[in-house]
Amino acid sequence: MFHVKTRENAETEMKKQGFEWEWDDASGNCKIISKVLPAVRVSSNGNKTFFNQIIAAYTGWVDKRNIYGKAVTYGDKTEMPKDIIEDLAKFMDDNKCAYQWSNGQFCIVDNTVAYHSR
């Protein structure tokens, strides 16, 4: 994630980005806790946009370090209600668009407007 080779370099990067972290000395894994982030931001076009990775973090970061439904919390560390996240994921799925691509086509996406191209 940080393209570093040592624990110390990783900690330097995490500190720069305002993260908290917890090392699991038995496995060598690191749990990274981000600062509280706004769900809505002003995008490059001046409009408010829902801009975050809440769905990916909640549903997709599932492994031995991340438990489904526990990767995202409110700022006070309480868990987000499952029904709210699932309703949000459904809304996003219902409102997505997809394009049929042909060889040679390309697209430039402004991530501040298009929710990280999702």
Image (cartoon, grey):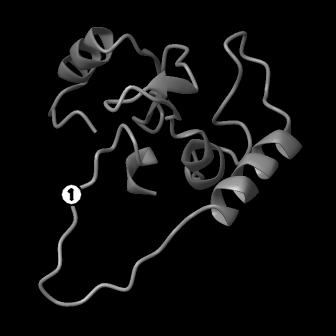
Determine whether 106 is above or below 64 in the image.
below
As helix, strand or loop, the secondary structure at mark 1 comes to loop
> How many numbered tags mark residues here?
1
Q: In the rendered image of this protein, does residue 98 appear above or below residue 44?
A: below
User: Which image quarter: residue 3?
Assistant: top left
Percent of width and height locating residue 95 = 63, 61
Kindly identify the residue that appears in the image at 15 percent across and 34 percent down. Answer: 5
Q: Position of residue 102 (x, y in %)?
A: 24, 89
Front in this rendered view, residue 53 or 49: 49
Give residue 71's position: percent from left, percent from top: 63, 36
* Residue 78 shown left or right of residue 8 in the figure: right
* Res. 23 in view: no
Q: Is residue 42 above or below residue 109?
A: above
Q: Is residue 44 visible?
A: yes
| Left or right of 65, for residue 93 | right
In the image: residue 1, left or right of residue 60: left
Question: Which of 33 and 36 lies nearest the eye of the viewer?
Answer: 36
Residue at point 81%, 50% (across, down): 87
Q: Position of residue 104 (x, y in %)?
A: 11, 84
Q: Which image quarter holds the N terminus?
A: top left
Q: Residue at x 27, y 53 (%)?
A: 109
Label 1 environment density (alpha carbons within 10 Å; few <14, some 14–19, many ≥20): few
User: Which kind of residue does numbered mark 1 sit on?
Assistant: Ile
The residue under label 1 is: 108
Of the pair 31 and 74, the residue shown nearer to us? 74
Residue at the limit of the structure toward the bottom, as seen here = 103
* Residue in view at x 71 percent, y 36 percent: 70
Which residue is nearer to you in this view: 101 or 15? 101
Instruction: Name the quadrant containing residue 11.
Output: top left
Picture quadrant of residue 18: top left
